[in-house]
Image (spheres, grey):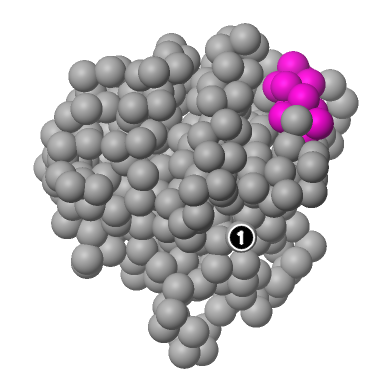
Amino acid sequence: MTGFESALPETPGEPPLFLRTREPGEASDRSDHSYPPLPEALVVPVYDNHTHLEIANGSEPDGGGSLDYHEQLDRASAVGVRGVVQVGTDLETSRWSAEQAAREPRMLAAVALHPNEAPVYAEAGGLDDALAEIFELAGWPRVRAVGETGLDFYRTTTDEARATQYRSFEAHIEIAKENGLALQIHDRDAHAEVIATLKRVGAPERTVFHCFSGDAELAEICTENGWYMSFAGNVTFKNANNLREALSVAPRALIMVETDAPYLTPMPFRGRPNAPYLIPHTLRAMAAHLGTDVSMLAAQISSNTELVYGSWSDEPVTAS
């Protein structure tokens, strides 16, 4: 849209359940699809605000070796990533996220229908039932957010499908508000429309733009409304000047960090599978761009994340 730039770069890996596919020419010729080595541990720990551990759990992301979510979390703990928000994108992954978070002390959950999934449910005649189940899952222990939800006009081009995305997005906003949960926004090629919807329907008190993909102008709008901006590994990409410009103007009190794993692996490992333990690369790049101490930024981001989602220390229902 005029005045905004979409900066969600191409994503490595096989398509997940929510219909995100590799872009033409994206890293398909890279021979190393293994997980990168562990980075130097952070002195002050942080959280991964948005990850999809179910994609890698017992699977082989992008041809890499299997790495189940327990090992993912163990690796994260070893480098100062103390917890994750595990995010659902359809009923199956939302159920999985809620179930695992109820048992795993290092995990909180977000549940939703991804905007690209909403038309799929609608075409099958099951959107209302699916939204009703998301409402039920929102009440589960350690489910702290509704997401990822929003608008994605990158692949959704028909008026009917876009209308369904609006309907689903508005329903998710209400689910978040009725349950007192945070809202995690997926916004791709729809900045102006997402903003207009949030203002028209009324955004929840804690609203997070996951994988922030705008520019300084969008960051200023988020700031005016008190919406959080979560930066992923693409902030480290050479072609992501607009993201770094947005980071420069975003108040530190509204910044978070995420992986969106197994996608958007930060430099210097772009093209290999991402995981929560790689957060230190993104955080250090953010601190370097801002000209601030890594530990100071980590402390601020950790505080912000706990303000949005609450404490990870609530006792899980059962041991994992």
Q: What is the x, y in percent for residue 230?
A: 38, 38
> Which three-letter amino acid code belongs to the residue tagged 1?
Leu
Q: Nearer the viewer, residue 128 or 299?
A: 128
Q: Is residue 301 left or right of residue 178?
A: left
The residue located at (49%, 48%) in the rendering is 159
Say few, some or many: other residues with alpha carbon within 10 Å of mark 1 (under 14 / 14 to 19 / 20 or more): some
Q: Is residue 281 above or below residue 251?
A: below
Q: Is residue 260 above or below residue 26?
A: above
Quadrant of res 264 = bottom left
Q: Which residue in the protein does label 1 denote?
A: 19
Furthest residue to the front? 159
Is 59 magenta? The answer is no
Q: Is residue 192 left or right of residue 309?
A: left
Is 140 magenta? The answer is yes
The residue located at (74%, 17%) in the rendering is 139
Can you say which quadrant of the picture contains the C terminus?
A: top right
Query: Does residue 211 appear anywhere in the picture?
Result: no
Predominant secondary structure, magenta span: helix
Please report the bounds of the magenta region as a residue range.
129-141
